[in-house]
Image (cartoon, rainbow, N blue to C red):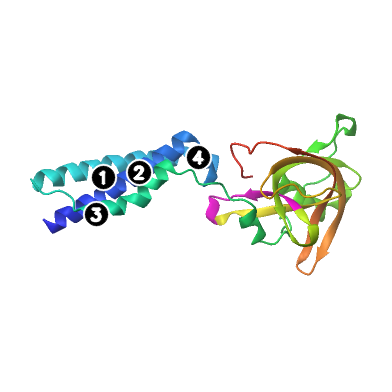
Amino acid sequence: MVVVVKRNVAGLVIVFVGAAMVQLATSGTYLRYVKPGMRWMLLAAGVVLVALAVTDVLVKSRQDHGHGLPRAAWLLLVPIFALLVVDPPALGADAAQRQSPVAAKPVAPQGNTYWDESAGPKPITVRDYAVWAVWEKDTMQGKSFQLTGFVTPAKNGVWYVTRIGLTCCVADGTAFMVEARGQAAPPKNQWITVTGKWAEPTKRTDGDVAALTVETVKPVAAPANPYE
């Protein structure tokens, strides 16, 4: 009986884990944890877990007539159930503050990129600006850009426009930060769109940090996919 009860508890835990995975994939909340391309794998894995666990629980329950789960066993399901009802936030300024704002040197140069300046500031990802503003100054100097990210404050009034880049999931999240100059810092974690001109990178002992002389700051809603 003890073995069957333990297997029933394990089965129910797996059911809740699978249900949580399905809920994350169908609601779009999965974008806070993994890249968009992993949605269908996450959904499929959740469905398979639920199906296998339900089958196992039903079979074992028939073999153990009259024996239910002890009350203490249900407590094991509380943290799993929380995944279904709690909406945890994406990585933000707290995660970024634990990383260096210095972007690594790219494997290959982007080459000369031209655009019509009369069309206004060029929209660019924070990741790309953080890299190319340091490593390809010649293509960036004197030009205007538009970046969207969240606010990460630092010491002495310094603040950054930030996005987290994912290779696979939040476990490997890398913060890409651009120092914003010329404007007071908005609230921490506030999503903003800024426009401004390329500025000389800030030199640090561990490398140079991309900078932008900010001309306009506009608060915006967080995007559905907060990562780059």
Q: In terms of depth relative to the viewer, which is nearer, 169 or 217?
A: 217
Residue drawn at x 54%, y 46% is 89
Asked if labels 2 and 4 touch by Cβ distance under 8 angstroms, the answer is no
Q: Is residue 77 visible?
A: yes
Of pointers 4 and 1, the one earlier in the residue sequence: 4
Q: Position of residue 138 (x, y in %)?
A: 88, 50
Q: Amino acid at mark 1?
A: Ala
Of pointers 3 and 1, the one earlier in the residue sequence: 1
Whether 2 is among the magenta residues is no
Asked if labels 2 and 3 touch by Cβ distance under 8 angstroms, the answer is no
Dot 4 alpha-carbon crowd within 10 angstroms: few under 14, some 14 to 19, many 20 or more: some
Q: In terms of depth relative to the viewer, which is nearer, 8 or 183?
A: 183
Asked if labels 1 and 4 touch by Cβ distance under 8 angstroms, the answer is no
Identify residue for label 3. 73
Q: In terms of depth relative to the viewer, which is nearer, 157 or 131?
A: 157
Q: CA distance from mark 1 to mark 2?
A: 9 Å
Considering the numbered disc 1 on the image, is that residue within a helix, a strand or a loop?
A: helix
Q: Nearer the viewer, mark 4 or mark 1?
A: 4
Q: Position of residue 84 (x, y in %)?
A: 40, 42
Q: Where does the magenta region start and end?
A: 160-171
